[in-house]
Image: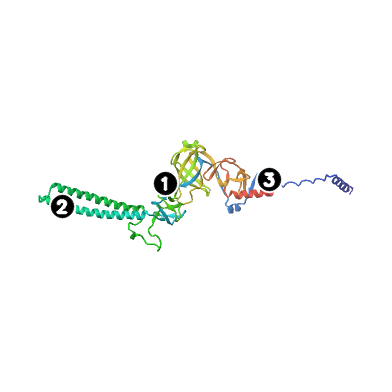
Amino acid sequence: MNRIVSAAIAALFLTACGNPPVPEAAPASAPVAAARASNIVTMSVEAQASSGVKVTSISAESVPEVIRATAKLTADENHTWRVGAVAEGRISRVQANPGDLVKKDQILAEMHSHDIHESRAAYKKAKADFARMQGIEEYRLKLKDRAKRLLDLRAGSVAQYEQAETEWKNSQTDVQNAEIEIEKAVTHLVEVLGIPVEEADVPQRVSGEDNDLIPVKAPSAGTVLIRTITPGTVVTPSTDLFTISDLSSLWAMAEVNEEYLGKLRIGMPVRVYVQAYPNQAFNGRIGKLGELLDPGTRTIKVRIELQNMQGKLKPEMYADAEIELGRGGTALMLPAEAVQDLRGEPVVFVKLSDDKFEMRPVQVGRTIGTDVEVLSGLKAGDQVVTQSAFILKSEFMKASLSEE
């Protein structure tokens, strides 16, 4: 009893002096500390199956040597058309908008032009001249025949006959020239302006509308990319009204460093990746190497030709291009999904047993397609989680937070 009282008095004395007794620290939890030190994550076989966790035994693979470059998608200029005006005039109607799919010869817009009336007047004049020249040719043919009969009757001279024949032949030439003028007028009206040669042949539209308009037609099937006109716009033959492109093929214009120029060849295979579909490679080939080097960036433009039958790629998208140069050795490759970012460091999860996985830091290198090269931290034969690795990362983070 005296010992207890003495201890209490000593404690009060220390407290009064400003030095309270320090309590003993609680012993650390041995199982939690061990788990944290060993970077182990436990997940039952059933939980793995329901979460879609997939494990793959990695091995050294033969990988190609590739060049990586940034690129920008553009329309294929070989399948792009800029539709202009065929005459000076004023736009009356616009029937196509950017993004519309159009067919060959589909009417995009209609315009009024004085060229219609002038061309029809030229056609009528050519017809009249043709009829007049035919009449003259028939008359001179009769004169030639008459001169021939007089010559046969010895009532006329050879000179008179030859003159009549020459005038008849000249009339034939005039008829042929008049016929050519008609053909030219018809060609301009029908093939250039796209309107009937006679006003009576013009299809009638709504009453009160101008039924005599020049149609602006699509030269080929494609997508309308640009429209520069509205109703009322005054245009000239130098004005671009629409830009149409067949987007089933595109170009990717890549910027490749000067040091790789000697390794590039037309026809080399290329894989292109865009942000919209990061795990999908779009295959293409080098179509052309640029002639000029950019003096600022020391890069050369490389045109990559891409097929885009599904329409997933769009002009103006930014992309990453991988140009294959050939086989470049072996490496340990993993799907990019297998490598997780943990506090700014790349890690993977290696299977140790049926329900235990080790979080292991790795050093990564090149990215080839959807795979990434592992430089250190793994060896051939390791069982690595290659699908749903983020599930194990979440479990590991939960365990780490519970320790704190």
* Viewer-side residue, 122 vs 386: 122
Is 113 situated left or right of 301 in this image?
Answer: left
CB-based contact (under 8 Å), mark 2 and mark 3: no
Is 55 situated left or right of 300 in this image?
Answer: right
Residue under pointer 2: 145
Helix, strand, or loop for circle 1?
helix
Give the Cα distance between marks 2 and 1.
61 Å
What's the residue at 22%, 49% (across, down)?
170
CB-based contact (under 8 Å), mark 3 and mark 1: no
What's the residue at 67%, 48% (across, down)?
400
Q: Amino acid at mark 1?
A: Asn
Helix, strand, or loop for circle 3?
helix
* Viewer-side residue, 306 vs 328: 306
Residue under pointer 3: 34
Mark 2 neighbour density, 10 Å: few (under 14) some (14–19) many (20 or more): some
Residue 79 visible? The answer is yes
Q: Amino acid at mark 3?
A: Ala
Q: Nearer the viewer, mark 2 or mark 3?
A: 2
Tell me which label, 2 or 1, sits earlier in the chain: 1
Residue 64: x percent and y percent?
A: 49, 40
Residue under pointer 1: 78
Give the Cα distance between marks 3 and 1.
66 Å
What's the residue at 28%, 51% (across, down)?
180
Q: Residue furthest left?
A: 154
Tell me which label, 3 or 1, sits earlier in the chain: 3
